[in-house]
Amino acid sequence: MEVPSYSLLTLVPIGIFTYLVAGAIYRLYFHPLSKFPGPKLAAVTHLYEFYFNIIKDGMFIWEIERMHQQYGPIVRITPHELHIKDPHFYDEIYASSARKREKYAGFVAHFGTPLSMVTTINHDHHRLRRGVLNSYFSKRSVTRLEPIIQEKVRKLAKRFEDASKAGTVVRLDAAYTALTMDIITRYSYGASYNYLDEDDFKISWKNAVLDASANGAMMRHFPFMLAVSKSIPPWLLKKLDPQIAVLLEIQHMVRKQSMESLENRSGKASQDTVFDALNDPSLPPEERTIDRFQDEGQILLAAGSETTAKTLTTITFHLLNRKSLLLKLKEELKQVMPTPSSTPTWTELEKLPYLTAVINEGLRLSYGVTTRLPRVAPNEALKYNDWVIPPGTPVSESSYFVHMDPSIFPNAESFDPERWIRAAEKGERLDRFIVSFTKGSRQCLGINLAYAELYLTLAGIMRRFDMDLYETTVDDVRLVRDRFFGASKDGSLGVRAVITGTGSDEE
């Protein structure tokens, strides 16, 4: 009897099919997460997330919301990952340094910065890298930075004065990004990029950061993309994938800046800038490579500019959209700013309850980043209600779901500073549910700098200027898509305003 012969071309697809079927069976019935609720397709393949994030362009956040509506507060959103929708459990996921929390290796490719602190997976290695910069972003250090922040706010005010005289429309989101960029570059490298001097506030930088961040979801699914892209000529890459081309342009810019700072630091003993700290000779040589400087610098500049600028933009929109809120803020600011050009300290401004409420509400409705940021407890089984989450499982809770939880923030879509005043009168600590900077050992390093910028900028601009929104609606600040930073409606021209008047010291 003749034995049939099968060609390699026949065996290969059979083998692949068998592998896929066996993998699907394992994930559905034998995987450590197989008992957790969620769509079967999401448990089987990452293509489920790929469809909503890539094909549907940033809509996975709404699919996660739908999953929670159907399956409850804990769901399996990918083959290896859980998502929890419960603000009271947030501190368990994003725990303090006393309990080890690591990054999820399958997620860090999103950032395109493999050597940065943000993408450092191991808990102890992260502590080493964060420890180098902690003192530079402490409240005491940021307070010493206050004159620089005030100088940049005055520069922004001068631009607004010029716009008022000329009757021109100001793109507020671009202006605020230029402000925060000039501050973070001055603190990081010792010299501002001076984007506040650019006619359009260097809006190309803002667009570049947003484009590069939006491309992160693609890099999560195809982590080899960055390495492959670096081998493609820039002119061709711009045609094939404009977003990743922009990311590489940012990396080249930061690399050049890092090399210049390295040369300028030669023979310098003091540590005046963040870059000086990164290049401390006492650090191991592998921590002081130009590739690491590039990756860390890219994260510092992107995160240090866009997130705070977005909060400033969100707050300004809502104040201009409801002038009664703005008038109340102006009246309170007069307590520490008798004239519009007064320069109160950050400490003085922090004591103003309504300004603090406005800032908290702005942080709540700008979310920080909207993409989930999973954490792994490598040696600890987390318990949520009746569920025991196996050690090593990536778990996340998106800031959007915390900030929009109606049981904590009734009428959550509304910009309502008074909710914070009411809570304070009752002795309630609503601020523990503000997770724009995440929490725990991996909390955003720049939280103190962000708060200083928010207080000093809002006081310096809102006390001094009258503005009207120009062809801008709530749709220009409402979250529609998750592109790491939340994105509003397609085609939005940003938040624009006309400066209708400036205060005078004789007021």
Image (cartoon, rainbow, N blue to C red):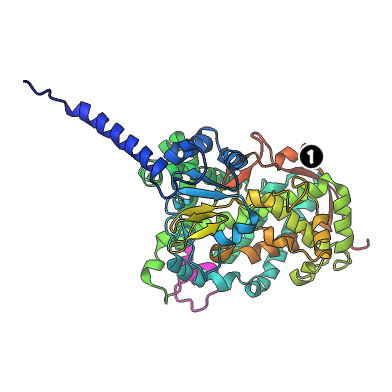
Coordinates of residue 39 in the picture (x, y in percent) = 51, 38
**Front residue of 506 and 115:** 115
Give the quarter of the image for residue 139.
bottom right
Coordinates of residue 378 in the picture (x, y in percent) = 43, 61
Query: Is 219 placed left or right of 157 in the picture?
Result: left
Which residue reaches farthest top?
1
**Front residue of 47 and 338:** 47
Task: Classify 10 Å Cα crowding around label 1: few (below 14), some (14-19), many (20 and above).
Answer: some
Residue range (magenta): 260-280
Quadrant for the N terminus, please.
top left
Query: Is 402 placed left or right of 123 in the picture?
Result: right
Residue 316 makes an appearance in the image: yes
Q: Is residue 135 magenta?
A: no
Coordinates of residue 488 in the picture (x, y in percent) = 66, 40
Which residue reaches farthest bottom?
269
Residue with the mark numbered 1: 470
Position of 7 relative to 341 (above/below): above
Q: Residue at x 18, y 29 (%)?
A: 8
Give the quarter of the image for residue 460.
bottom right
Query: Which amino acid type is shown beneath numbered disc 1?
Result: Tyr
Coordinates of residue 80 in the picture (x, y in percent) = 44, 48
Count of numbered badges drawn on the protein: 1
Q: Residue at x 48, y 76 (%)?
A: 268
**Front residue of 85 and 358:** 85
Element under label 1? loop
Q: Is residue 277 magenta?
A: yes
Position of 255 relative to 221 (above/below): below
Which residue reaches farthest front?
386
Give the quarter of the image for residue 87.
bottom right
Residue 245 makes an appearance in the image: no
